[in-house]
Amino acid sequence: MKESDKKLLGQYLPAAAVEPVAKWIVSYKIHFTITRSRRTKLGDYRPPIRYSNHRITINHNLNPYAFLITFIHELAHLQVYKQYKNKVLPHGKQWRETYRKLMLEMMQRAVFPADVHRALEKSIVKAKASSSSEMELTRVLMRYDEESQTETRVEDLPPDTVFITENGMRFRKGEKQRTRYKCLNLQNNRVYTFHPLTPVREVK
């Protein structure tokens, strides 16, 4: 990989992660793209079926630690595909074991700050990923987002508060059911569930 390409990676990754990520991209001949922000996903992996190379895309607006974790997530999909093709579940046992191994390798390089490192231990290393531990990891990663410090999230709102989502829909916050909040859509009177960390705008 050219030094100019590594310099570009350095704009998105923690400094200590640039070299190993560059080696992975070269060794697996990955067509790697830093793409626009996507609402439904942070990253994406495509196997070499329609294309000649493995393809990984990562959203450009992630903080360095979220960017790295997302890359490792997609790299785990690549490694699982190479070994099993489409014969296993996308996030099944094989993927979890591969992801854990890759993450351990990266954590040994002391790439992550202490709070992210601890959250990763809970969600990846010490136990199987659970909804609560993954939410804790997401919450910790958000500390490093420039815009997240000023955002209002569903969990920040008192019960019965009316809020507006990114697409302009109005909801009234309801009770929490396990890991998500039940909220009433005031335009069609239907109930939807929201992740606690969903950014919204409160209606005063």
Image (cartoon, rainbow, N blue to C red):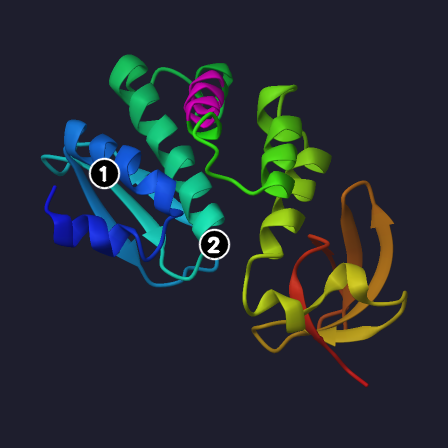
Q: Which image quadrant is residue 73 in?
A: top left
Of labels 1 and 2, earlier in sequence is 1
Q: Quadrant of the N terminus?
A: top left
Q: What amino acid is found at the position of numbered circle 2 in the picture?
A: Thr
Q: Residue at x 78, y 59 (%)?
A: 155
Q: Where is residue 103 shown, x and y percent of the image?
A: 46, 27
Q: Which residues are magenta?
A: 97-105
Q: Which image quadrant is residue 151 in?
A: bottom right
Q: Depth check: 198 or 16 in front?
A: 16
Main secondary-structure element of the magenta-colored stretch: helix
Q: Quadrant of the C terminus?
A: bottom right
Numbered tag placed on residue 22 in the rendering = 1
CA distance separating discs 1 and 2: 26 Å
Numbered tag placed on residue 40 in the rendering = 2
Left or right of 71? Residue 30 is left
190 w.r.t. 134: above or below: below
Q: Residue at x 51, y 40 (%)?
A: 112
Sort mark 1 into few (<14), some (14-19) or many (20+) by Cα contacts within 10 Å. Answer: some
Q: What amino acid is found at the position of numbered circle 1 in the picture?
A: Ala
Please give the count of numbered marks on the rendered protein: 2
Q: Secondary structure at mark 2?
A: loop
Q: Secondary structure at mark 1?
A: helix
Left or right of 91? Residue 22 is left
Numbered tag placed on residue 7 in the rendering = none
153 w.r.t. 132: above or below: below
